[in-house]
Amino acid sequence: MLAALGVAVSGCSGPGQPTQAPAATATATGTQAQGVEAHDPGLPSPSPTSTWSAAEQAMIDRWARLNAQCRGGPGDDPATQTACDEREDASKRLVDAGICYGKVGEAGYQMTTHRCDDRSLARQ
């Protein structure tokens, strides 16, 4: 569940949406340790000190694609609900893999995707 990543969400429409705008595409991943790329504001920002393996990046990208489908899809379309359900599963898998979003005391614009630690919202 995305709440475990530190972003409050509920169903696919209505209150509790992530603190950032929905993504048109889920291809930009933002700042990497090797340099700076353009960051899509609809995706959780990666920590400037985090580097991800190919498998971890694929998990993050999958969550971002599902989030865009969930938040951008019509509320009465079964495919939208499927994307929302799969996003929740992807969120749990990210946390299980030690990838978290947001830390205690951060405002939404400050939150980044990072390796989970004791200050991670998912660990509270």
Image (cartoon, rainbow, N blue to C red):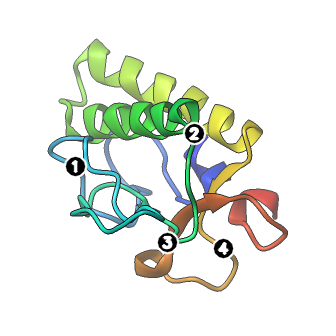
Above or below, comparing residue 34 to residue 4 in the picture: below
Q: Position of residue 97 (x, y in %)?
A: 72, 38
The reply to whether callout 3 and callout 2 are in contact (CB within 8 Å) is no
The single residue placed furthest to the top in the displayed view is 78
Residue picked out by circle 2: 53
Residue tagged by mark 3? 48
Q: How many marks?
A: 4
Observer-side mark, 2 or 4, equals 2
Q: Nearer the viewer, mark 2 or mark 1?
A: 2
Left or right, residue 51 beside residue 43: right
**Tags 4 and 1 touching, CB below 8 Å:** no
Image location (x, y in percent) of residue 62: 42, 30
Q: Are marks 2 and 1 in contact (CB under 8 Å)?
A: no
Q: Which mark is residue 23?
A: 1
Residue 89: % across, % down? 59, 27
| Cα gap from disc 4 to disc 1, whole angstroms | 22 Å
The Cα atoms of the two marked residues, 2 and 1, are separated by: 23 Å
Q: What is the CA distance from the residue labelled 2 to the residue labelled 4?
A: 22 Å
Q: Is residue 49 left or right of residue 97?
A: left
Question: Which comes before the other along the chain, label 4 or label 3?
Answer: 3
Q: Quadrant of residue 93?
A: top right
Q: Amino acid at mark 3?
A: Pro
